[in-house]
Image: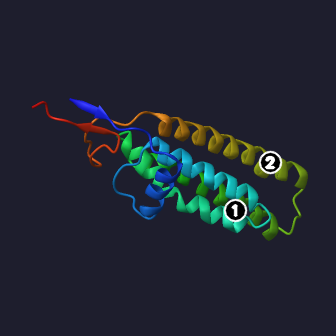
Amino acid sequence: MIETTPSLGFTEAINAAASKIFQIKGRSRRSEFWWTHMIVYLLSTALTPVPIFGGILNLLVIPLKIRRLHDTGRSAWWWGIGALIKISFVVYILYSSAKLALNGYEFEDYDSFVFEYIVLKGILFIGAIAIYDVFLLILCCIDSDKGENKYGPSPKYIDKEIV
């Protein structure tokens, strides 16, 4: 018989996330994921004048996102796809900017180059990133796999043998 353990409270969830801050292996519950993300969001918002801190906080929750995906039976590659899209966007913007600078801004139609290569494609990349982030969020909302999966035992469901 499978039994469900109660949700983690705020303190329990933050302690669970902090104790496994650099751990990618294993699984994490939704309560651990949501409470930690709430704290990261609030701190990132409060530290907006110093964006490097928000960036560091967001990097620190990557292992938690991966463990949350593991809890639903999904590979870390689901997170990796989004990272590849974001890296591609940065590389593309750097490439377009370098192309502009190396040509000394002497294009026949400078405005259409900027609009087509930077603005339009930038909007497409940002749209793809936003859609993927929503998709990843939906994956993190899905309930845990009951019982053990290839990433370890369930932190939520405990298999009790009938005696």
74 vs 46, left or right, is: left
Horizontal arrangement in the rendering, residue 137 relative to residue 147 (left or right): right
Which residue is at 41% across, 51% downward? 67
Q: Where is residue 29 drawn, in percent x and y?
A: 42, 44
Q: Percent from the top left, x then y, of residue 39?
A: 62, 53
Q: Mark number for residue 65? A: none
Foreground residue among 8 and 88: 8
Point out the residue furthest to the left here. 163
Q: Amino acid at mark 1?
A: Tyr
> How many discs appear?
2
Q: Depth check: give the residue in front, 112 or 66.
A: 66
SS type, badge 2: helix
Q: Earlier in the sequence, mark 2 or mark 1?
A: 1
15 or 143: nearer the viewer: 15
Up-down: is 50 above or below 128? below
Q: Is residue 132 left or right of residue 103?
A: left
Label 2: which residue? 119
Front tag of 2 and 1: 2
Residue at the location (46% across, 52% down)?
12
Residue 100 in sight from this viewpoint: yes
Location of the N terminus by quadrant is: top left
State how far apart marks 2 and 1 are (Cα). 14 Å
Across and down, in percent, residue 123 comes to: 74, 44
Answer few, some or many: residues within 10 Å of disc 2's Cα (few below 14, many 20 plus, some between 14 and 19). Answer: some
User: Is 124 on the left-hand or right-hand side of 8?
Assistant: right
Question: Pointer 1: residues within 10 angstroms few (<14), some, or many (20+)?
Answer: few
Residue at 90% x, 51% y is: 111
Classify 141 as above or below 81: above
The label shown at residue 95 is 1
Q: Residue at x 49, y 45 (%)?
A: 9
> Mark 1: which secondary structure?
helix
Q: Are marks 2 and 1 in contact (CB under 8 Å)?
A: no
